[in-house]
Amino acid sequence: MNLRQLLSTVLAASAIGLLVMSTCGPRKGKTSWREVPCQVISSRVVRADKTIGNYATPTVGFRGDYGVNYIIEGRRSFSWEFAGWWDTSEEFVRNKVTVLPETCPFSVRYNPEKPDAVVLVRR
């Protein structure tokens, strides 16, 4: 994966996060969403083919995910979130996500009126 593809992937993930926050997240004049801390407790590599450029055939690729733990109103929850790494080499991605970050790279926000409404966005 070259730098342009990596930046494209990161920008796409950020745009999706912003879209989710603007659609589902905190809004002015509405309930104030609360943020809770999180912890990365595991990682995985999953196959994630994607179309690159104008090619009709998807490129075989792999995505790294982090397993994220967080607690909302006393209830522990877990979510798989994109770690920011995608490549055609499974080994490359595995090497990038094997060492877990010390601090959680995600912001976890929830609606206190509907605690099941949770949004995780990469910081």
Image (cartoon, helix red, strand yellow):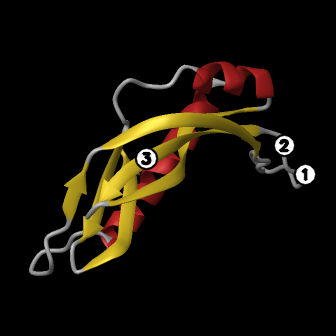
Residue 46 in the image: x percent, y percent? Answer: 74, 43
Question: Label 1 belongs to which residue?
Answer: 57
Q: Is residue 123 visible?
A: no
- What residue occupies the far left of the structure in this picture? 29
- What residue occupies the far front of the structure in this picture? 74
What amino acid type should be assigned to the residue bearing mark 3? Asn
Question: Label 3 belongs to which residue?
Answer: 69
Q: Secondary structure at mark 3?
A: strand
Residue 20 in the image: x percent, y percent? Answer: 40, 66
Horizontal side, residue 48 vs residue 106: left or right: right
Q: Secondary structure at mark 1?
A: loop
Q: CA distance from mark 2 to mark 1?
A: 7 Å
Give neighbour class at mark 1: few <14, some 14-19, many 20+ (Cα, 10 Å).
few
Give neighbour class at mark 3: few <14, some 14-19, many 20+ (Cα, 10 Å).
some
Q: CA distance from mark 1 to mark 3?
A: 36 Å
What amino acid type should be assigned to the residue bearing mark 1? Thr
* Nearer-N-terminus badge (3/2): 2
Check the image and report above or below for 47 versus 15.
Answer: above
* Nearer-N-terminus badge (1/3): 1
Classify the position of the N terminus by image quarter: top right
Residue 73 in the image: x percent, y percent? Answer: 26, 64
What amino acid type should be assigned to the residue bearing mark 2? Thr
Residue name at image x 61 percent, y 22 percent: 98
